Image (cartoon, rainbow, N blue to C red):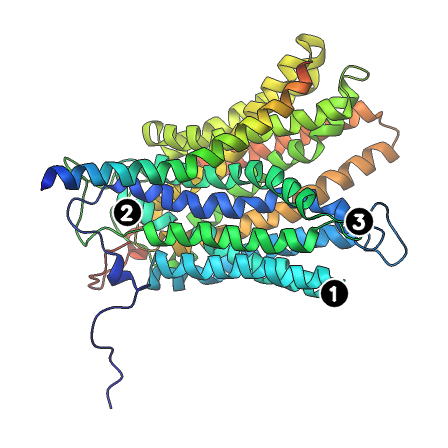
Amino acid sequence: MASNRIGSPGLLDRERIVAGPGFNRWLVPPAALCVHLAIGEVYAFSVFNIPMTRLLGVTKHAPGDWTNPDVTWIFSIAILFLGLSAAFAGSWLDRVGPRKAMVAAALCFGGGFIVAAIGVAMHNLAVVYLGYGVIGGCGLGIAYISPVKTLISWFPDRPGMATGLAIMGFGGGAMIGAPLSVWLMRHFATASGNGVAATFVALGVIYAAYMLIGAAIVRVPAPGWQPAGFVPARTNGLVTTETVHVDEALRTPQFYLLWLVLCLNVTAGIAVLSQASPMIQQMFHGRVSPVAAAGFVGLLSIFNMAGRFVWASASDWIGRKNTYAVFFLLGIVLYVLLPSTGRLGGVGLFVIVSGIILSMYGGGFATIPAYLRDVFGVRYVGAIHGRLLTAWAAAGVLGPLLISYLREYLLANGVAQADAYTLTLYIMAGLLFVGFLCNLAMRPVRAHHFVTTGDTEVGA
Amino acid sequence: MSGSRTSSSVVSLLLAWALVGIPLAWGVAMTASNAMKLFQ
């Protein structure tokens, strides 16, 4: 018996969500934002660190309570599985379309919270790792890449702006997640418990529902759809109208150059982000309190979020290669300048310089999907983006390690604390120079990598 | 007919953007208000 499916497509199938005539494409960015604002919560997970080390003692750490390193592993596992699932799920996502992927992501992310809540209630760390780290992490990866190709297909005239909007949500999600989590923990706290398990359940339900709303709204354009008045540019410089298959993309030097470009940009950004609070307190000793330093970190997250939209949108005008050239060249100047800002202009100048650096860190994430679209075409951009995100995972692990070992090495060799920051920033400027050279080496993909067989699927 | 379709499209658009814009604006306002401690 033939196994071909007959009848109308299922609720989650790509065929079911092809937009009809008159559909307003500006409904798609909010759909993507529902998903990205939800998963951006991962950056706020540190608000659970202290409460999770006091699950037994409630008000203070008690024997048998988890330690801080035990708890910080939850975030690391989640980020690791974000990278792995984005890399492996990209091809599946391209096949099934955004709605099914968003639903899968919502179930994984929301379900991960629920499993983690069971782990907290049982005081079983392995269950928490499995829940938030593995299951939730897979939800993060699928969700992160799920709207990218759809947005690029709806906005061929402004792909940077469209993906910048969604990825801005990932930067902004922590700003919602942190106060929401703190409020929920206060609400659920009792004399015998600090409310972490109940907060996880509430967050799982809230975020899953929010992501499912995005899945309900999302639509893909009909085959051949173009915005009114849009004329696709012919192959021009790095921008191609051809298609490179995801497996073939991995055989091109361009993929690895862009991998390095992203990895180096992220590593340098993490150097500032991870050292921001102690750096400002030591550089302005006695003038910046720990509370004010925490406010500074919050301010950096606003720059990080805004940079995602602003830089990615700017890349539609000045080109992707030029945008990254600005990130690297301006970055080098600012990293070298940052240690001197105390003498030059005080706290205000330090904040502005750090903010611009963080805006370019966020901008790097948000501009990369459009860069991939330019170089490899639209068709497999979701899957290629997923594979490229391994650069993020690598930078997320290697960056902080490199920075902490570097600092330890410098301090062990008699370098003063404040000077250790200076040297670290100079070394990061060196990494940015390598990134600049990688970006400079970008050339159009050679024609023999292009897909040549007939291929009719054009939906997002 | 097309007028009612256009107005329903505008309403859905406003609702969709409010759904993401309001929580985001709240989160940014909370963060900015904490950040002000830096300049006090």
Name the residue rendered at 49%, 61% in the picture: A107
The tag earlier along the polypeptide, 3 or 1, is 1
Disc 2 from disc 1: Cα separation: 46 Å
Residue where numbered disc 3 is placed = A191
Whole-percent x and y of residue B29? 54, 26
Neighbour tally class for label 3: few under 14, some 14-19, many 20 plus, Cα within 10 Å: few
| Tags 3 and 2 touching, CB below 8 Å | no
Q: Is residue A122 above or below residue A330?
A: below
Q: Nearer the viewer, mark 3 or mark 1?
A: 3
- Left or right of residue A183, residue A372 in this image: left
Relative depth, front residue between A414 and A296: A296
Q: Nearer the viewer, mark 3 or mark 2?
A: 3
Q: Quadrant of residue A6?
A: bottom left
Q: Is residue A458 above or below residue A282?
A: below
Residue where numbered disc 2 is placed = A153
Residue where numbered disc 1 is placed = A122
Check disc 1 and report its element: helix, strand or loop: helix
Name the residue rendered at 14%, 35% in the picture: A229
